[in-house]
């Protein structure tokens, strides 16, 4: 009975996500000119999508390294090759199989089964991995908020600028304290993991830059980057399938305040999702083999 209830709950969550995704997409295309979006698509400079794919893949490699730093801290010693395989499988589960156990849960299940690593420690590692990515985004956002001209009066005040500077200075120390008191077993990996985390997010910013160039955008780049990071936070919330619709909504509603073209911004967001889906799809073709612990 309990298993049946869990399955019903998973189906309900999936249906809800599908409904929210459909609603978000409807709101996006209600706000933008579809003909303009089509014209932008036809003028796309495809050559720039090659480095987009390369840097997006690199960003995922870097974040996979981050997760393995956490694994090694709890004496789960698997090779980087097998760690990357698991990471890709997890990406596929998260994007294409949104109901049920999810990519993180599947990795926890496999690693617990093979190495008997406590589930609690594996869940903590996965949660910390997510938090590390969020912290890197927030850190970069503070810097971009200082550089981008936002058409909101409060954002032009000395108080706002002071808060952003304080955010830059305090983000890492605050995260260190959070890790010390709530994830203290992982503290030895703090600096190495967060270095990989920042590297991964910077790779995605470079990826975003090439997408903008493919769309012929050479001005107001930092504004697009700012909204891209904000949309990454929203897309990470488990509200829609793969963040579809949610990310685009952020671009649509933010364009007025930062001076970006909303149709171009939506095109940017859709390209980023397609690249993400393409890389995630690789996880479907990876055959999992029980990893061997390193000596």
Image (cartoon, rainbow, N blue to C red):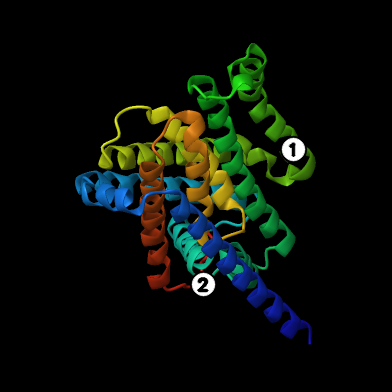
| In front of the other: 162 or 55 | 162
Q: Quadrant of the C terminus?
A: bottom right
Q: Residue at x 47, y 73 (%)?
A: 289
User: Callout 1: 10 Å neighbours few (<14), some, many (20+)?
Assistant: few
Residue 295 makes an appearance in the image:
no
Number of numbered discs visible in the structure rendering: 2
Residue for badge 1: 178
Which disc number belongs to residue 290? 2
Secondary structure found at label 1: helix
Residue under the point 38% across and 40% down: 208
The one nearer the camera, 79 or 160, is 160
Q: Residue 97: where, in percent of width, then height? A: 52, 71
Establish if 173 lies above or below 227: above
Q: Is residue 272 left or right of residue 129?
A: left
- Farthest residue toward the bottom? 1
Mark 1 and mark 2 lie on one chain; the one further toward the N terminus is: 1
Comparing labels 1 and 2, the label whose residue is closer to the camera? 1
Q: Position of residue 43 (x, y in %)?
A: 21, 46
Q: Quadrant of residue 287?
A: bottom left
Visible in this render: residue 45?
yes
> How packed is label 2: few (under 14 Cα within 10 Å), some, or many (20 or more)?
few
Residue 192 appears at what percent x and percent y?
55, 37
- For the N terminus, give its image quadrant: bottom right
């Amino acid at each position: 009975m309990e298993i049946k209830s869990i399955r019903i709950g998973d189906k309900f969550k999936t249906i809800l996500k599908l409904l929210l995704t459909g609603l978000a997409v409807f709101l996006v295309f209600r706000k933008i000119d579809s003909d303009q979006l089509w014209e932008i698509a036809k003028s796309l400079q495809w050559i720039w999508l090659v480095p987009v794919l390369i840097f997006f893949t690199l960003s995922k490699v870097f974040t996979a390294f981050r997760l393995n730093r956490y694994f090694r801290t709890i004496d789960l010693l698997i090779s980087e090759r097998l760690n990357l395989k698991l990471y890709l499988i997890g990406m596929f589960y998260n994007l294409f199989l949104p109901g049920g156990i999810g990519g993180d849960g599947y990795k926890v299940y496999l690693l617990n089964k093979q190495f008997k690593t406590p589930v609690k420690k594996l869940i903590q590692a996965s949660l910390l991995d997510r938090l590390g990515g969020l912290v890197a985004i927030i850190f970069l956002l503070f810097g971009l908020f200082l550089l981008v001209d936002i058409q909101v009066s409060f954002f032009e005040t000395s108080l706002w600028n002071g808060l952003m500077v304080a955010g830059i200075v305090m983000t890492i120390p605050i995260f260190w304290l959070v890790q010390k008191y709530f994830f203290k077993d992982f503290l030895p990996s703090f600096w190495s993991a967060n270095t990989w985390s920042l590297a991964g997010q910077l790779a995605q910013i470079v990826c975003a830059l090439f997408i903008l160039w493919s769309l012929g955008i050479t001005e107001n780049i930092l504004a697009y980057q700012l909204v891209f990071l904000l949309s990454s936070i929203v897309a990470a919330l488990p509200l829609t399938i793969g963040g579809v619709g949610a990310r685009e909504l952020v671009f649509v509603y933010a364009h007025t305040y930062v001076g970006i073209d909303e149709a171009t911004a939506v095109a940017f967001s859709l390209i980023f999702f397609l690249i993400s889906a393409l890389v995630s799809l690789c996880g479907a073709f990876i055959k999992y083999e029980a990893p061997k612990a390193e000596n």
